[in-house]
Amino acid sequence: MKKIYMYTDGACKGNPGAGGYACILVYGGREKVLSGGEAETTNNRMELSAVIAGLSALKEPCEVEICSDSKYIVSAINEGWLRSWVKNNWKKSDKKPVLNVDLWQKYIEVSAKHTLKFVWVRGHNGHAYNERCDEIAVAEAEKFTK
């Protein structure tokens, strides 16, 4: 199974507002950059869109280490929130509806064949790939503000 390193970030001009996301996939010394955005979105949607874009680009089952500065995503996976949300019919522990269900369902679909490890990195703290993803995501968001 191939070992892929994935670095992701999302950005939003206002929250909600114009948003962008970026993902950098690294394998065998090569990089693939994926990015996009939306005119009206939230930061969490863009963070999750980056992960989905990266996983969707993989053509075969892989071992993927995903580095993100999004506590929302990393905690949802590592602390079992997502499993609980699914089990509780997309309700949080406070019985309120889970946000971004459409994207979480897409994440479940595109992640199923992979072995994943999520690692949280502090944003804007000098992590080279995180900084690059942030720059790309911000540039994507700015496309919608002109």
Image (spheres, rainbow, N blue to C red):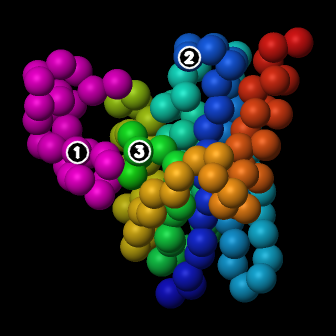
Residue beneath disc 2: 15
Q: Quadrant of the C terminus?
A: top right
Q: Earlier in the sequence, mark 2 or mark 3?
A: 2
In magenta, the rendered stretch is 75-99
Residue beneath disc 1: 81
Q: Residue at x 58, y 34 (%)?
A: 46
Question: Is 29 contained in the magenta span?
Answer: no
Position of residue 128 measured from the top left corner of the image (x, y, whole percent) = 73, 62
Q: Is residue 14 above or below residue 122?
A: above
Q: Residue at x 41, y 68 (%)?
A: 116
The label shown at residue 71 is: 3
Compared across the picture, whether 40 is left or right of 45 comes to right
Compared across the picture, whether 121 is left or right of 126 comes to left
Which residue in the rendered view is the most extreme toward the front? 125
Position of residue 91 measured from the top left corner of the image (x, y, whole percent) = 17, 28
Q: Earlier in the sequence, mark 3 or mark 1?
A: 3
Foreground of the two, 4 or 10:
10
Q: Is residue 69 above or below residue 145?
A: below
Q: Secondary structure at mark 2?
A: loop
Q: Nearer the viewer, mark 2 or mark 1?
A: 2
Q: Is residue 100 above or below residue 75?
A: above
Q: Secondary structure at mark 3?
A: helix
